[in-house]
């Protein structure tokens, strides 16, 4: 699935996918429980899952009772794709602008700042 496929998730789909990545192979009821903070009905969550199935990003194993869902896309791959998309769509490919914007609007802990420095030093090697 991940080969050369360009991914595109709506905000709703990100929430559903995050539940799948976290839970592994959950039932519909488990997904509904995982995203209950959004107030979606069971029918709505089912519809979101069907849409993701149609995009080839989710698989439903209906041989099990109750049936189970699983992500066909690794979270790391989806995050990389989305980051690349945001970098080019919002920041016109300017990584420095993206980083200064992210660091300028976030409150980094000392530990996070040190980790960021370590990553930058490693990239410069």
Image (cartoon, grey):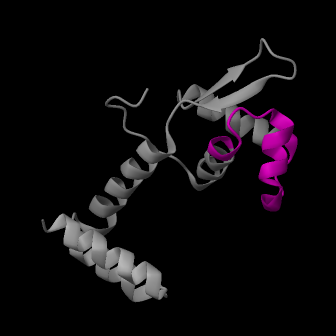
Any part of residue 57 in sight: yes
Location of residue 71 by image quarter: top right
Q: Is residue 25 magenta?
A: yes
Residue in the picture at 73% in, 36% down: 47
Most foreground residue, 101 or 22: 22
Magenta part mainly helix, strand or loop? helix
Q: Horizontally, is 124 left or right of 105 in the view?
A: left
Residue 77: image location, x then y, percent? 42, 43
Any part of residue 94 in sight: no
Q: Residue furthest left?
A: 125
Q: Residue furthest top?
A: 63
Most foreground residue, 67 or 7: 67
Q: Which residues are magenta?
A: 20-42
Residue in the picture at 45% in, 81% down: 111
Q: Horizontally, is 33 left or right of 110 in the view?
A: right
Most foreground residue, 113 or 57: 113
Residue in the picture at 12% in, 65% down: 125
Against 3, is 87 above or below?
below
Location of residue 61 by image quarter: top right
């Amino acid at each position: 699935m991940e080969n050369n496929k360009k991914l595109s998730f709506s905000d709703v789909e990100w929430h559903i996918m995050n539940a799948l990545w976290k839970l592994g192979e959950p039932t519909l009821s488990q997904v509904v429980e995982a995203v209950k903070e959004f107030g979606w009905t069971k029918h709505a969550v089912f519809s979101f899952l069907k849409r993701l199935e149609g995009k080839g990003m989710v698989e439903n194993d209906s041989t099990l009772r109750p049936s189970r869902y699983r992500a066909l896309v690794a979270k790391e791959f989806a995050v990389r794709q989305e980051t690349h998309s945001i970098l080019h769509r919002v920041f016109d490919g300017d990584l420095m602008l993206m980083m200064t914007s992210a660091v300028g609007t976030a409150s980094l802990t000392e530990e996070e700042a040190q980790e960021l420095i370590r990553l930058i030093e490693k990239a410069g090697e």
